[in-house]
Amino acid sequence: MATKAKRERRKERNRERNREHSKAVRTARLKNIGLILIAVIVVVGGGGYFFANAKTLPPTGWGPGHSELLPAQQVSTRPIAPSIQEHVMERDATHVPGQMLIQYNCDDYECDPDLKNDLQEIVTRFPPTVYMAPYPGMDAMIALAAPGRLVVLEELDEDKIVEFIRDNLDR
């Protein structure tokens, strides 16, 4: 009889250990799930913060969704579509060298009334591969973009613009 009682006590202790072990396993799983959820929230939240605070500037390269079109004219009063901007940035043996964008944003910045005319006067001194257009919503007053190069200006600086254009005409 004593051995039967010992066996029962041993079985009860084993059941208790199993319950404690199961409880510990559940607790560990919940902690792991919690850590995973926190990591997901940080990654998603951080990505949202990054995209919400990313600057809007002209492209300096091209992607798979670019257009095969170029701007309709050298000086435009309308914004150039992003897919066309990317095509201007494309470089290979089939593309004319010296294509670049000179863009301005007078919607979000206080521009001098003569800014557009002054930019046009500069741009039209050069070949028609130098395009000028507005870029509303851009995070700069003036942006000069060529393949792999971007210069942002907060005011008209004719010398910098001319230097940028000349440096990029043969590229």
Image (cartoon, rainbow, N blue to C red):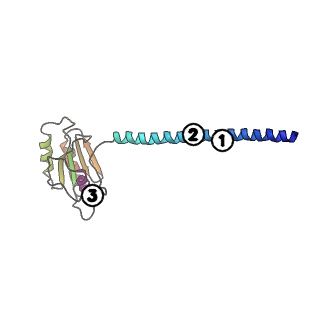
Q: How far apart are the alpha carbons under marks 2 and 3?
A: 51 Å
* Magenta stretch, main secondary structure class: loop
Name the disc covering residue 30, or none.
2
Density class for disc 2 (Cα within 10 Å; few <14, some 14-19, many ≥20) is few
Q: Position of residue 87 (x, y in %)?
A: 25, 56
Which of pointers 2 and 1 lies earlier in the amino acid sequence? 1
Q: Residue 124: within the magenta?
A: no
64 over 106 or under it: above or below: below
Q: CA distance from mark 2 to mark 1?
A: 12 Å
Q: Nearer the viewer, residue 116 or 79?
A: 79
Q: Which mark is residue 90?
A: 3
Image position, residue 84 (x, y; %): 23, 54
In front of the other: label 2 or label 1?
1
Q: Which mark is residue 155?
A: none
In front here: 61 or 34? 34
- Which numbered circle lies on residue 22? 1
What residue span does the magenta drawing correspond to?
A: 74-95
Residue located farthest toward the right when viewing the structure as drawn: 1
- In this view of the protein, which residue sits in the foreground, 60 or 46? 46
- What residue type is disc 1 on? Ser
User: Which callout, 3 or 1, points at the residue further toward the start of the chain?
Assistant: 1
Please say whether residue 92 is visible from this viewpoint: yes
The residues tagged by marks 3 and 1 sit, at their Cα atoms, a distance apart of 61 Å
